[in-house]
Amino acid sequence: MRTFVIAAALAALAAPAFAAPWSAVPAAASTKTGFVASTVIWDCAASGCVAKSDTNGADELSECKGLAREVGALTSFTGERGAMSEARLATCNKSARHA
């Protein structure tokens, strides 16, 4: 029984690590890697950007704005609540860098 309780506790702690990573798709392809947008480390490839660090406690809109400042306007941003609405994405893209 004691082993079961310890295993359950460890599984509960590890669960957030298996959550789907945050992702985004810039309007123009970016290959920037290993940069911090706001508080999260991001890596980008031709197909889009993926969060590479813990997103626990990070604010999705703030992170979206930080990413847009780094790579330009985004066509989508997906966080732990799913895809960002078009209205929130438009707010995010106001922070986008301009080429």
Image (cartoon, helix red, strand yellow):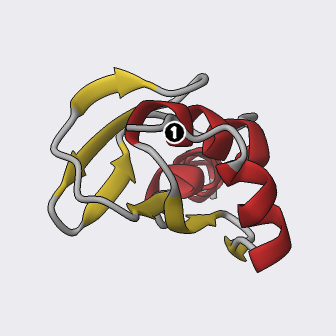
> Height in image: 1 above or below 87?
above
Most foreground residue, 50 or 25: 25
Instruction: Report the residue at 34% width, 23% height from top.
Output: 35
Instruction: Report the residue at 62% width, 48% height from top.
Output: 2
On the image, numbered disc 1 is attached to which residue?
67
Instruction: Report the residue at 57% width, 41% height from top.
Output: 96
Most foreground residue, 13 or 68: 68
- Residue 19 lies, in percent from the top left, at 52, 63
| The image quarter in which residue 1 lies | bottom right
Circle 1 sits in a helix, a strand or a loop, which is it?
helix
- Residue 60 lies, in percent from the top left, at 72, 48
Count the marks.
1
Most foreground residue, 58 or 98: 98
For this view, does 77 lie left or right of residue 65?
left
Most foreground residue, 97 or 81: 97
Instruction: Report the residue at 74% width, 70% height from top.
Output: 81
Residue type beneath disc 1: Leu
For this view, does 82 lie left or right of residue 3?
right
- Residue 91 lies, in percent from the top left, at 81, 54
Mark 1 surroundings: few (<14), some (14-19) or many (≥20) residues within 10 A: many
For this view, does 89 lie left or right of residue 67?
right
Residue 19 is at least partly visible in this image: no
Q: Quadrant of the C terminus?
A: top left
> Height in image: 42 above or below 90?
above
Residue 79 is at least partly visible in this image: yes
- Residue 69 lies, in percent from the top left, at 53, 32
